[in-house]
Amino acid sequence: MKYNHIFFDLDHTIWDFDKNAAETLHELYLTYSLQELGLSSVHSFVEHYTYHNHALWASYHLGQITKEELRQSRFKNTFEAMGVCADQIPTDFEDVYLHTCSTKTNLFPQAHETLSYLFSKYKLHLITNGFREQALMKINLSNLGQYFETVVISENVGANKPHRDIFEYALNGAGALKEESVMIGDSIEADIRGAMDFGMDAIFFNPTLQQKPSDVTKEIHNLDDLLLIL
């Protein structure tokens, strides 16, 4: 099928969320002397955070919790799971983490090369469930804005992927038809099934080689795989 419009997810698809988060947490582990709170291993801290953060984001995608609940819970859950009492958790940790992480610029391999190639052939767009201020920082500091005609952030729309409203909003803003559009993202529920249920094609970005659900037909493991299929 000939596409005219390609819609990308941002976090975990272009912007390497886990790598940037780990880098930030290593820095904050030292800044806040977390070893003194009983967190003997920064690697264990990153693993606990990753687990709780991913679980909360899955709930946020589905509208089961709010942005505020996600932000209030992820480090509270992480610290408490590691034996730190709530009153020992640094009060500004979430805010400092959120700002610091958003300044990181680690992208998935071949991100710029792939986007540059696709930019020469298609109209590119972003749809992200990320927080508005942080999403814009990531895009600007990583020099990604040059590729995308439109950027849709769920906070501005009032709906998260996989809700059809955000896909409809994105296509209307892009002047695109479903039949000529494809969504690329890492989340089966938010990106892939969200797009497919809306009537768009979707390509599952699967760098960690998860088992692909049977209803997902198109998959890539590296961003530059797109050069072979688009």
Image (cartoon, rainbow, N blue to C red):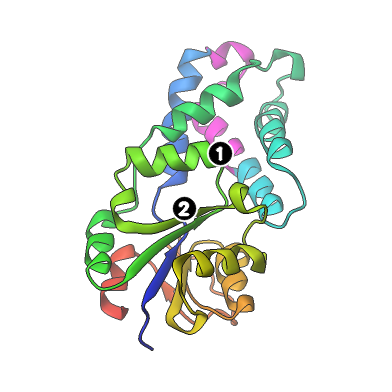
Does the magenta portion include 218?
no
Query: What amino acid does circle 1 point to?
Result: Glu
Q: Which type of secondary structure does the marked residue at label 1 adopt?
A: helix
Q: Which residue is mark 1?
A: 47
The residue shown at (33%, 37%) is 141
- Residue 222 relative to residue 80: left or right: left
Within 10 Å of the Cα at label 2, are there few (<14), some (14-19), or many (20+) other Cα atoms? some
Task: Give the distance between the C-alpha atoms of the residues marked 1 and 2, in whole angstroms.
Answer: 16 Å
Q: Which type of secondary structure does the marked residue at label 2 adopt?
A: loop
Q: Which residue is mark 2?
A: 12
The residue shown at (46%, 16%) is 30
Bounds of the magenta segment: 33-50
The residue shown at (67%, 52%) is 158
Q: Quadrant of the N terminus?
A: bottom left
Q: Is residue 204 visible?
A: no
- Residue 35 relative to residue 63: left or right: left
Compared with 34, 62 (above or below) is: below
Q: Choose mark 1 or mark 2, whichever is in front.
A: 2
The picture quadrant where one finds residue 224 is bottom left
Outermost residue on the bottom side: it is 1
Q: Counting residues from the N terminus, which is met first, the one under dot 1 or under dot 2?
A: 2
At which x and y percent is residue 179?
Answer: 48, 84
Magenta segment, prevailing SS (helix, strand or loop): helix
Query: What amino acid does circle 2 point to?
Result: His
At which x and y percent is residue 18?
Answer: 47, 44
The picture quadrant where one finds residue 139 is top left
Does the magenta portion include 45?
yes
The residue shown at (56%, 30%) is 45
Compared with 207, 192 (above or below) is: below
At which x and y percent is residue 169?
Answer: 58, 64
Within 10 Å of the Cα at label 1, are there few (<14), some (14-19), or many (20+) other Cα atoms? few
